Amino acid sequence: MGAKVIRVDGDFDPKILSEAVELLKNDQVVAIPTETVYGLAANALKPAAIKHIFQAKSRPSDNPLIVHISSLSMLYPLIKRPQNFDLFETLMSAFWPGPLTFLFSKSSLIPEEVTGGLSTVCIRFPENTIARAIIDQCGFPLAAPSANISGRPSPTEASHVLEDLKERIPLIVDGGPCSKGVESTVINLLSDPPMILRSGSITLEMLRKFVPNVQIYQPEKGNELDPISNAALASLHTKGSLSPGMKYRHYSPKANLFLLESTCFDDDQTLDLISKLERFCEERNIRGSILLNTPICKNIDGNSDPHLIIDSFSSSSYQTIARELFAKLRKLDSLDVKFILMFSITNDNEGSAVMNRVLKASHSVLTSTEQVTCSFQKLFI
């Protein structure tokens, strides 16, 4: 039969959410809007409910979930207060409700199914009024990873959820496009120094105004830091990841995604690359795409060649690229392209969140037209 879709507009009657709330109270899953991406929600306190999330998404059971709350009073029973809780409170005051997730030591109320067996839990207070109203009416926190098949680009519209989960879940609450378009920033204030475990729209620069020594976790530089200076957790990295988005490949379109290093391509080189790609696709009778975020895109006819689709973001701002990224990848997948080339952006501010997602989804990073040609000749013989 497929999932039912309920449209909820900005000025909504809370009663319109009653069907979603009833399903959640009966340990079912419901896709709900947030400001980041659509979430697949279930009762965070019920292992039976949580299992439906993993089943619907085909998600590995050691990939932890983020718990969503609708008030600070809902937070306190879920956590063990750390000694530096005043630092948490400072950031909560600045960024909650909003797209910032904190890592806490969990209380016994949080089942291991939520945390992947870890003693820590990720919690956030969403800004989206529909999500908060649903949590309020349920009276319990909701675990809610992105409402997609694991590994696929995250859903930023209800139609994306329907595309992935139509036959797997009973209900989608359609609250319109997500305002941010990328998952929340995840911060670990239990480690020394504090670490950003996943980049998002709350940026390193924004956080350093309150936590000057915060860093972005770099897995190639070592294992995950012990989050609470406890010898029992010293080998935590061998058991699982502290935060979603750290361990498994995420955000990937069906097509092979390649990241082009922007600093290696001037306008003439970009035009030369496009010309070569057009010939390459025509000779092999395949369809490919290039996703531009530079001013040169204004000088290119995106419909000039049926074999090469040239698309671009509606502006070059980090916020726009972040908001439109997943929708662009899904759109190009729907056009049955075999590859997507995307240019890199500066890895600071919200650019860090975009680059984090693109790198996780990418086949490889290419720095010249010759590298593109060589890689494609191996892939598309």
Image (cartoon, rainbow, N blue to C red):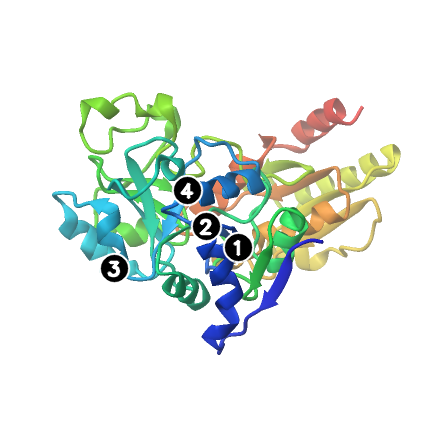
Callouts 1 and 4 close, C-beta under 8 Å: no
Q: Secondary structure at mark 3?
A: helix
Looking at the rendered structure, the kind of residue marked 4 is: Leu
Query: What residue did someone put label 3 on?
Result: 72
Looking at the rendered structure, the kind of residue marked 1 is: Val
Side of 106 where 239 appears, left or right: right
Which residue is at the far front? 26
Q: State which quarter of the image contains the N terminus.
A: bottom right
Q: Is residue 293 visible?
A: no
Query: What residue did someone put label 4 on?
Result: 65
Alpha carbon of mark 2 to alpha carbon of mark 1: how far? 7 Å
173 to 216, vertically: above or below: below
- Mark 1 or 3, which is nearer the eye? 1
Alpha carbon of mark 2 to alpha carbon of mark 3: how far? 19 Å
Q: Secondary structure at mark 2?
A: strand
- Mark 2 or 3, which is nearer the eye? 2
125 to 122, vertically: above or below: below
User: What x and y, as percent, mark residue 98?
Assistant: 36, 59
